[in-house]
Amino acid sequence: MTNLRRLVVGAGIAWALAFVVVGIGADLQLWGDGALFSYAVAVRDTFGFHWHNISGRLSIHLVAHRPAEALVALTGSARAGIVLYGLLLFAAPLLGLVATSAVDRTPGRRLFVAACLSTALLCPLVFPCPTEMWMAHALFWPTLALCHGAPLTRGGTLAIAAALLALVFSHEGGLVLAAAILVTLGLRGLRTTRFLRAAAALTLALAVWGLVKLTIRPDDYIGAVLTTAAFRFVDPDNLLDPAVLLIVAALAIFASLAAVLRRAGIAAPVACAFGTTVLLLAVYWLALDHAVLAENRYPLRTVLLIGPPVLAVLAVMPALRDEDRLPAWLRRPADELVALARRIGPAIAAGAFLLVMLIHAVETTKFGLAWRDYADAVRRLATGAASDPKLGDPRFVSAARIAPALQRLAWNSTTPYLSVLVAPGFAPTRLVVDPTATYFWISCATATRSAAEPSAVPAEARALLRRLACLHRP
């Protein structure tokens, strides 16, 4: 393995480990929609709270929610279940890399390298948003490797069928990723056994997916929201975030400087260009930067839909070329890709990769520190004496009291659940409510049922959430 490949693999594994350590250490599973999911784990009703509305995404429910709920039932500790939920969620990329490494049979383990590259380049833009596309990305790479390398036996076929079923049930985007796997297999030929086997397995998975979707229908209130969210998910404007633009600008500056310095005969032009770009980034972060990549981590899920298929094709084509299995009409594009990689050179590629890693590390750190301050601000309101009865109850307090600089971390629909989760003993004196919220997760009936059942969450906290739900979704 070349030094560049070692760098990519090391970075992918390092980020996969960091997601677990940082995510659990900072309770990042509570951010965004994760506050609702974590609370639902605590009261052991994730399916009733929301997952029945998205029955086509059962993979994350079965892998992360159900085990966490079982732990709450076993121990009586809501905190233990929430931590396990976060652990299983944040460990998905690491487990995906381990599985990909185990089943990859391509020359040079190209699919494993591509999986590490995808994890390092794309996942930090989304972390820690508890999106089902996070799970889809983790499942995509071992499924791809299985489809290309599993033995042509009954066991291999069953493994592929199970992997494709899990991928399809991760997110609607998983359907696109599964189709992308078929495209890469189609590069071998549409009549090959591997393509036909995967096509049959995917057809079966889609039939099961469709049956579940028809059987378990979303609530009317949620159905309209899901339709709107689907169009937002595929909006290319999602990529126009300051953090993404910063990456593009840094890479452009680095490449331009390296080219100019090389033509000028400067010694070590790549190293000089890299150092200069890092210096410019430091000046930007210290003097000009006021942005935090927070709410936009959710729409940036789009990169997990676009990026993996592109990287998969770029990895499969050279692999098939080396195996002399690439169709004649693709040999020239594959040769051109190899030639382009050689022209760029490992030094430029490594420098560009390290710049992206640096930006990811800084943006993740900025987000983590801002999240800590925001969670502390919510906790102070939830345990304080301030009240805003105009919100519907004297036990409610407005999230607008939080400093504007921290509002960038707010997720208005889940703030009430967060205020319960960050309060000592899950027992807030006030429910923190965002007055700008227009979307309410659970109905009055669901909240009433939850308030009446035995739970690891104190009854008073559940009563506060019931009051809020009944005010807005009677």
Image (spheres, rainbow, N blue to C red):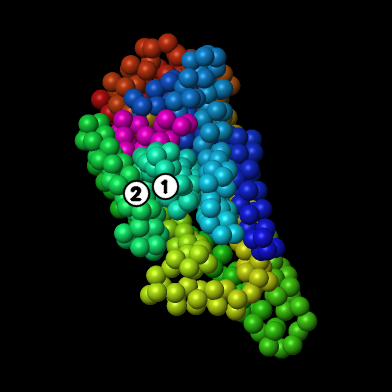
Q: Which residue is mark 2?
A: 197
What residue is rendered at 53% in x and 46% in y?
Answer: 103
In the image, which residues are magenta? 51-64
Q: Is residue 63 magenta?
A: yes
Locate residue 240 relative to residue 87 in the image: left or right.
left
Residue furthest front as drawn: 153
Q: Which mark is residue 152?
A: 1
Picture layout, residue 205 above or below residue 362: above
Q: Earlier in the sequence, mark 1 or mark 2?
A: 1
Find residue 244 and report its horizontal and vertical position in percent. Answer: 52, 61
Task: Please name which of the two marks, 1 or 2, marks the residue nearer to the observer.
Answer: 1
Question: Within 10 Å of the Cα at label 2, are there few (<14), some (14-19), or many (20+) other Cα atoms?
Answer: some
Task: Find numbered disc 2 in the image and state the secondary structure of the residue it sits on.
Answer: helix
What amino acid is at disc 1?
Answer: Leu
- Is residue 72 or residue 278 the one in the foreground? 72
Mark 1 → mark 2, Cα distance in angstroms: 9 Å
Residue 221 visible somewhere in the drawing? no
